[in-house]
Image (cartoon, grey):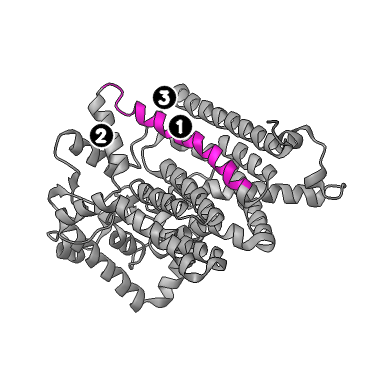
């Protein structure tokens, strides 16, 4: 049977996205092979756990705030186990991890394109895939171990399956979305933070089926997600004697960003004996009184104690806490440079200003024209920025990497909106005769 024009266009877009994904893979592999860079500075905890696993000591690490080594839940399990597999291989222990990370980064180009088709329209979808393929920050971060690339990939898959569940209304689709949430939790907590809001949106979208049916889908998805996560949750219960869904760490992050010396980032500034200012990891600046209180406590109790300390400081200093929250919110969306410590890369500033400006235009336009469709894609941006504003942000903005593909989707839309507004042709976005635009719309 002959293929309809609509299917032909869909097939061509699929071929275009496949080509873009291959380009993305080539750029990432080229960067890895060309520069042969492998950085471990931002994955010290993952690598420490990986070494213990490879040595046969299980998922263990030195206590974050203590003087003992033991089973831990400091990190989500997938990345340490993947790194441990590389150590087990022996030769070029992290080479295979970089390959898998590059594949995940390339696959994101396909997924963001398909997501854009569902949320916006084909041209913005195809353009966002191209932008993601050549997006320098995510190519640069291929050299680091960590969950940043995998977290972004998991988030895209969860969103795609969420829209499928909303479109089809079947329990099978809801179960698939729940399974994706569960698997993503092994890599990153990013999708789980927004999951309750995703569930509310799904129920709202299916409300015409009746509220009982509409609520069944998110309930089933939650049950499946918990079932997928349950092996690790049971392991955590066996280790800690308490319920830890995936990982600990909230208490540390909350105190880190909310205390009398907090800067808003995960680093403190100190002056050394030569009078030079330098950064020191925040946990090494903990007051001795607090450190002695938690030093011999079990890991979960340490986190609970630090969470109480953080909330107590917020309660006692609401004005300072509010200003610190605002500062962290700003640092999440921009960069943190310290005079006489950091150089200011002007090109990066200009580049990011452009991305942020087009994102704001695109997000505003999408909310004005298709708010209920666009909301799930914006939710992870909101929850991630607010969570880090409450707790702590990273001085090197890596906490933003998992949601930056979503920013690029709206930035692509914003770019097309701006081009359409300043074009002398009416309806430029739909009628442009440029070769590139025609290829994107085929």
| Above/below status of 56 relative to 384 | above
**Local crowd size for mark 2, using a 10 Å CA cut-off: few (<14), some (14–19), many (≥20):** many
The answer to whether residue 106 is magenta is yes
Camera-nearest label, 2 or 1? 1
**Location of mark 1 (residue):** 103
Front residue of this view, candidates 336 and 207: 207
Q: Secondary structure at mark 1?
A: helix
The quadrant holding residue 167 is: bottom right
Quadrant where the N terminus sits is top right
Q: Secondary structure at mark 2?
A: helix
**Local crowd size for mark 3, using a 10 Å CA cut-off: few (<14), some (14–19), many (≥20):** few
Front residue of this view, candidates 405 and 38: 405
The residue shown at (41%, 24%) is 36
Q: Which mark is residue 84?
A: 2
Residue 130 image point, x, y percent: 62, 36
Q: How many marks?
A: 3
Q: CA distance from mark 2 to mark 3?
A: 20 Å
**Local crowd size for mark 1, using a 10 Å CA cut-off: few (<14), some (14–19), many (≥20):** many
The answer to whether residue 110 is magenta is yes
Judged left or right of residue 376, residue 363 is: right
The quadrant holding residue 66 is: bottom left
Front residue of this view, candidates 24 and 250: 24
Q: Which residues are magenta?
A: 91-117
The answer to the question of whether label 2 and label 3 lie on touching residues, with beta carbons closer than 8 A, is: no
Q: Secondary structure at mark 3?
A: loop
Front residue of this view, candidates 9 and 368: 9
Q: Which numbered disc flags the more N-terminal residue, 3 or 1?
A: 3
Quadrant where the C terminus sits is top right
The answer to the question of whether label 3 and label 1 lie on touching residues, with beta carbons closer than 8 A, is: no
**Location of mark 3 (residue):** 36
Q: Which numbered disc flags the more N-terminal residue, 2 or 3?
A: 3
């Amino acid at each position: 049977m002959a293929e309809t024009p609509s299917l032909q266009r869909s097939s061509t877009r699929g071929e275009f996205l496949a080509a873009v994904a291959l380009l993305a893979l080539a750029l990432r592999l080229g960067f890895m092979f060309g520069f042969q860079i492998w950085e471990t500075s931002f994955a010290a905890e993952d690598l420490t756990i990986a070494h213990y696993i490879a040595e046969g000591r299980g998922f263990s690490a030195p206590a974050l705030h203590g003087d003992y080594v033991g089973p831990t839940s400091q990190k989500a399990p997938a990345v340490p186990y993947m790194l441990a597999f590389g150590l087990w291989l022996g030769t070029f222990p992290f080479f295979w991890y970089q390959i898998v990370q590059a594949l995940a980064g390339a696959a994101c180009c396909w997924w963001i394109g398909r997501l854009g088709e569902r949320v916006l329209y084909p041209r913005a979808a195809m353009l966002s895939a191209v932008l993601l393929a050549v997006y320098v920050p995510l190519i640069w971060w291929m050299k680091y171990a960590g969950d940043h690339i995998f977290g972004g990939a998991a988030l895209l898959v969860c969103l795609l399956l969420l829209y499928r569940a909303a479109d089809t209304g079947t329990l099978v689709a809801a179960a698939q979305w729940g399974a994706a949430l569960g698997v993503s939790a092994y890599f990153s907590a990013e999708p789980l933070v927004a999951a309750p809001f995703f569930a509310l949106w799904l129920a709202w979208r299916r409300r015409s089926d009746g509220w009982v049916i509409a609520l069944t889908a998110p309930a089933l998805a939650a049950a499946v997600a918990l079932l997928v996560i349950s092996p690790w949750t049971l392991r955590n219960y066996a280790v800690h004697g308490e319920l830890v869904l995936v990982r600990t760490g909230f208490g540390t992050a909350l105190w880190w960003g909310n205390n009398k010396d907090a800067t808003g980032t995960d680093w403190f500034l100190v002056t050394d004996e030569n009078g030079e200012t330098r950064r020191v990891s925040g946990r090494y600046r903990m007051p001795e009184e607090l450190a002695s209180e938690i030093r011999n406590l079990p890991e979960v109790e340490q986190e609970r104690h630090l969470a109480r300390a953080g909330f107590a400081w917020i309660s006692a200093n609401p004005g300072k806490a509010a200003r610190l929250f605002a500062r962290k919110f700003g640092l999440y969306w921009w960069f943190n440079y310290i005079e006489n410590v950091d150089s200011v890369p002007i090109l990066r500033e200009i580049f990011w200003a452009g991305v942020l400006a087009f994102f704001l235009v695109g997000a505003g336009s999408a909310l004005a024209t298709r708010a209920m469709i666009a909301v799930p894609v914006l939710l992870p941006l909101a929850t991630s920025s607010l969570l880090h504003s409450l707790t702590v942000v990273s001085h090197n903005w890596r906490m933003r990497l998992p949601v930056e593909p979503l920013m690029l989707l709206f930035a692509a839309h914003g770019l097309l909106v701006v081009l359409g507004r300043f074009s002398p042709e009416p309806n430029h976005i739909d009628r442009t005769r440029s070769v590139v635009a025609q290829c994107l719309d085929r």
